[in-house]
Image (cartoon, rainbow, N blue to C red):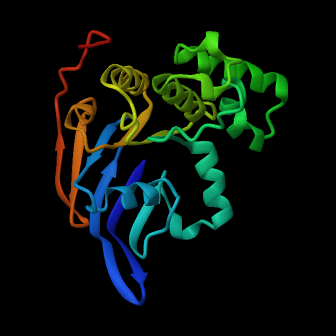
Amino acid sequence: MIEIKDLKKEYFEQEIPTQALRGVNFSIEKGEFVSIMGPSGSGKSTLLHILSFLDRPTGGVYKFLGKSIDEMSDKELARVRNSDMGFVFQSFNLLSRLSVYDNVEIPLLYSDIPAIKRKGIVEEVVRSVGLEDKLHTEAGRLSGGQKQRVAIARALVTDPSVIFADEPTGNLDSQSGLQVMEILASLNKKGRTVILVTHETETAGFANRIIRIKDGVVESDKAITSNRVLNGSLK
């Protein structure tokens, strides 16, 4: 699904270059659950932004579903991002005055799916995160854990190939964070690819592979055997 070779990203501030990524190499297969970890300033957030088409690299090769992003226009990148990628952010990024239904529907408004079919899709993904009783509640009235579950439903509504989760438990208490990670792990067990950025070791432990970034390069890339998922339930 994802292949990057010698990926580099350089920023300039007052003509002074800063190398955020110094030559990163790895690939991610369909259906993997990968955690990307690293200290502040390691380059992990920059890497996530490039992987999710929110930024472009300044060097190296990035292929998504077999196609180099160098061959894609900004318009095509936006189209692929909307159709094949779902996003879950630490700060939820919901519109607080809109209902759960309206927040989840937003990505579909850029498609040609008719309203009646959108309704069925939205109701199904909201049900999948256990919030069907909050469908018409304003997002601003929800708890932090509920808001993040709405964000996951919104990420699922376009049936994306991959879900990018950027510190999804960072603003949550431990119980709410556990519920969010249970949902992501369940989605992965059903075949969804999940790429998670986190600084929390316990959260990263839900993945089956951890890539550690330090000073803009891959420090380690290891498969892990999680003891959290057993017989379909999380321990």
The residue lying toward the viewer, choosing from 182 and 229, is: 182
Query: Residue at point 41% right, 82% down?
Result: 12
Q: In this view, does 108 lie to the left or right of 6?
A: right
On screen, 177 above or below 199? above
Q: In this view, does 230 lie to the left or right of 4?
A: left
Q: In which quarter of the image is residue 135?
A: top right
In the image, residue 202 lies at what x, y percent? 21, 31
Residue projecting furthest to the front: 141
In the image, residue 25 lies at what x, y percent? 28, 62
Count of marks overlaid on the render: 0
Q: Quadrant of residue 95?
A: top right
On screen, 56 above or below 143? below
Query: Residue at point 60% right, 32% down?
Result: 154
Query: Residue at point 23% right, 49% down?
Result: 211
In the image, residue 31 lies at what x, y percent? 39, 34
Query: Residue at point 63% right, 9% down?
Result: 133
The residue lying toward the viewer, choosing from 88 and 209, is: 88
The C terminus lies in quadrant: top left
Q: Quadrant of residue 140?
A: top right
On screen, 3 above or below 190? below
In the image, residue 86 lies at what x, y percent? 54, 40
Residue projecting furthest to the bottom: 15
